[in-house]
Image (tube, rainbow, N blue to C red):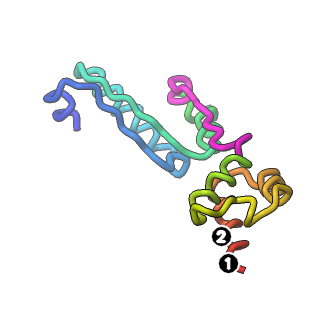
Amino acid sequence: MLALIQKCRKTVVLFVDEAHDLHHSTLLQIKRIIELVRNNGGILSVVLTGHPKLKNDLRRPSLEEIGARTNVFNLEGIRGYQVEYIKWLLGECIQENCLPEDLITDEAIAFLAERLTTPLQIEHYLQRASST
């Protein structure tokens, strides 16, 4: 990887999804790779994505070396827009001449929006409701 970065002379970004599942020693090795690339004149940025557990792990004393060098961004997803998401999702799934309100009441949409926070939860419960 180091040879490729040196050959291309471009900034490289490594994306790691589900980083909350990485072992602490793997996170330390990633830091060492970044330092090795920097010492050889390259630039390697790492984007770790994961559950809030990752942020908590990076704050622990055992990962202080990494945590001090990270910027944490919280992505709220659809939080606060669940009603709009439910209506949009229903609109995408029904026939053109039908409205979401023809399938489910505004009260039911408000109830789901209050109780569910992620798109996966919403899709799951709407699918269950529509198959009964």
Q: Main secondary structure of the magenta part?
A: loop
- Considering depth in this image, is 35 or 49 the residue closer to the camera? 49
What is the three-letter code of the residue carrying label 2? Gln
Crowding at mark 1 (Cα within 10 Å: few <14, some 14-19, many 20+): few
* Total numbered labels: 2
The residue pinned by badge 1 equals 131
What is the three-letter code of the residue carrying label 1? Ser
Q: Quadrant of the N terminus?
A: top left
Q: Residue at x 82, y 51 (%)?
A: 114
- Considering depth in this image, is 3 or 115 the residue closer to the camera? 115
- Report helix, strand or loop for mark 1: loop
Answer with left or right where residue 31 lies relative to residue 85: left
Crowding at mark 2 (Cα within 10 Å: few <14, some 14-19, many 20+): few
Q: Residue at x 50, y 46 (%)?
A: 19
| 70 drawn magenta | yes
Using the image, tell me which numbered label, if any, was put on residue 127.
2
Q: Quadrant of the C terminus?
A: bottom right
Q: Residue 68's image quarter?
A: top right
- Considering depth in this image, is 52 or 113 the residue closer to the camera? 113
Question: Badges 2 and 1: C-beta atoms under 8 Å apart?
Answer: yes
Give the residues drawn in magenta, as a range.
65-81
Answer with left or right where residue 125 lies relative to residue 9: right
Mark 2–mark 1 distance (CA, rounded to whole Å): 6 Å
- Considering depth in this image, is 77 or 73 the residue closer to the camera? 77
Whole-percent x, y for residue 130 in the image: 69, 73
Whole-percent x, y for residue 75 in the image: 61, 37
